[in-house]
Image: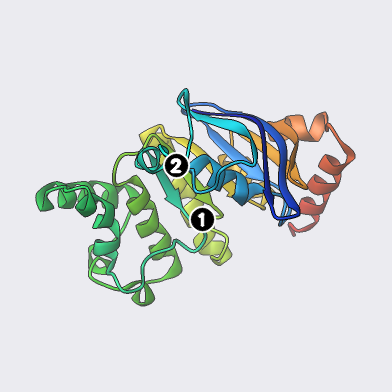
Amino acid sequence: MFILKGVSRSFGAVLALERVNLTVESGKTTVLIGPSGCGKSTLLRLMLGLLAPTSGGLEFEGAPITPANAPALRQRMGYVVQGGGLFPHLTARENVALLARHLGWSRECTEARTRELALLARIEDDIWDRYPREISGGQGQRVALVRALMLDPEVLLLDEPLGALDPLVRADLQEGLAQVFSTLKKTVVLVTHDLGEAAFFGHTLVLMQGGRIVQEGSLKELQETPADPFVTRFLEAQGRLVV
């Protein structure tokens, strides 16, 4: 689905990503994990074409991602930001229908797709005419997921989608998201700093530090054959957070 070759990205004098090589498999969930500031979200925004690499190149389904074609390619990708990113002046229904309306979908088609996804995401009927401030964080994340799935994208890109939620709501949504991923058989790239969440979702874990990929593989591979002492330190530090 994605191929990254020697991708680097700088912001002024700050090197955010350094010579990243990565292949994201179709139909699998790839999880970008690592400490804050390691480059996870920057990498996701490069895949979306929201940023251009300083050097190196990216491909999406065999086509180079360029500033010229990025807007069209993004219509084939679903994106959920941390906190959901719902527009506060629009109702839940209006948030979900925004891009479909922009692309000229009929009202009947938009409503049918909304009902289909609402059932899959377990969204109650009574929230659709409420504004984001009037619904819970968990409900807001479900609405954001439906918005990302509205155009039936080929890939879902999720940036810390559950990071701001309390543990019980987070656990419930993890189960819900896993069901959605399984049912729709989507390619998923998920950013998180939480090892338990990464292991729950990920076919492949990509551990990053300082803008570089330290190791990728299953949790078992990271545990049993760490490529760098940082891998072991990160896993042990995460383990101490679990009571």
Q: Residue at x 42, y 35 (%)?
A: 182
Image location (x, y in percent) of residue 134:
34, 77
Residue 221 vs residue 213, the one in the foreground: 213
Residue at the limit of the structure toward the top, as seen here = 62
Amino acid type assigned to the residue bearing label 2 in the image: Leu
**Is 202 situated above or below 89?**
above
Residue position for label 1: 161
Q: Residue at x 85, y 43 (%)?
A: 230
Q: Secondary structure at mark 2?
A: strand
Q: Residue at x 61, y 49 (%)?
A: 42
Residue at the limit of the structure toward the bottom, as seen here = 134
Q: Secondary structure at mark 1?
A: loop
Q: CA distance from mark 2 to mark 1?
A: 11 Å
Image location (x, y in percent) of residue 66:
48, 36
Residue at the limit of the structure toward the right, as seen here = 229
Quadrant of residue 136 in the image? bottom left
Image location (x, y in percent) of residue 85:
43, 63
Left or right, 240 with reference to 7:
right
Residue position for label 2: 156
